Amino acid sequence: MKMLKKGINFMGKSVKKFFLRLSDPSIILFSTLILIFSLAVIIRSIPLKWGLFLTEFDPYYEYYLAKKTLEKGVLWWFQYSPSQREFDTLFWYPYGRDLRRTSQPGVPILVTLIYIFL
């Protein structure tokens, strides 16, 4: 009986010590970040059961801009002048849209450079 009380008392102290260490802010922060990251990966991987392909319209548009940047060169984005407007009617038919003036160049240029270097 005495041995049982010592065991319970020892377990109580170790559990208490564990929870005191667990209340350290850095451990709580690290655990929360791991939980959030795991949840994000799980949620983002749900569509994989239907196949790996681009969904929605934005990835197709970024792909189109990267392809156009690869064809015309990376400096094409920076050689803009109002007299040299290029209207692309693929997305805004019938009037067209000047891609260099109305699009952000970051993703297409980065993708083009990665494609060139790889």
Image: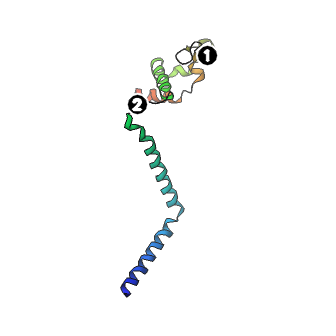
Front residue of 97/56: it is 56
Front residue of 76/41: it is 41
Are circles 2 and 1 on residues that touch, CB within 8 Å?
A: no
Q: Which quadrant is home to the N terminus?
A: bottom left
Q: Is residue 117 above or below residue 80?
A: below
**In this view, which residue lies farthest toward the right?**
82
Q: Is residue 9 above or below residue 26?
A: below
Task: Classify 10 Å Cα crowding around label 2: few (below 14), some (14-19), many (20 and above).
Answer: few
Q: Position of residue 30 (x, y in %)?
A: 49, 56
Q: Residue 84 lies in what quarter of the image?
A: top right
Q: Which quadrant is home to the C terminus?
A: top left
Q: Position of residue 114 (x, y in %)?
A: 43, 30
Q: Secondary structure at mark 2?
A: loop
On screen, residue 111 versus residue 84, left or right, reads: left
Residue at 38% across / 33% down in the picture?
52
Q: Earlier in the sequence, mark 2 or mark 1?
A: 2
Residue at 56% across / 20% down in the picture?
99
Front residue of 28/5: it is 5
Residue assigned mark 2: 53
Residue assigned mark 1: 81
Q: Secondary structure at mark 1?
A: loop
Q: Residue 51 lies in what quarter of the image?
A: top left
Q: Position of residue 115 (x, y in %)?
A: 41, 27
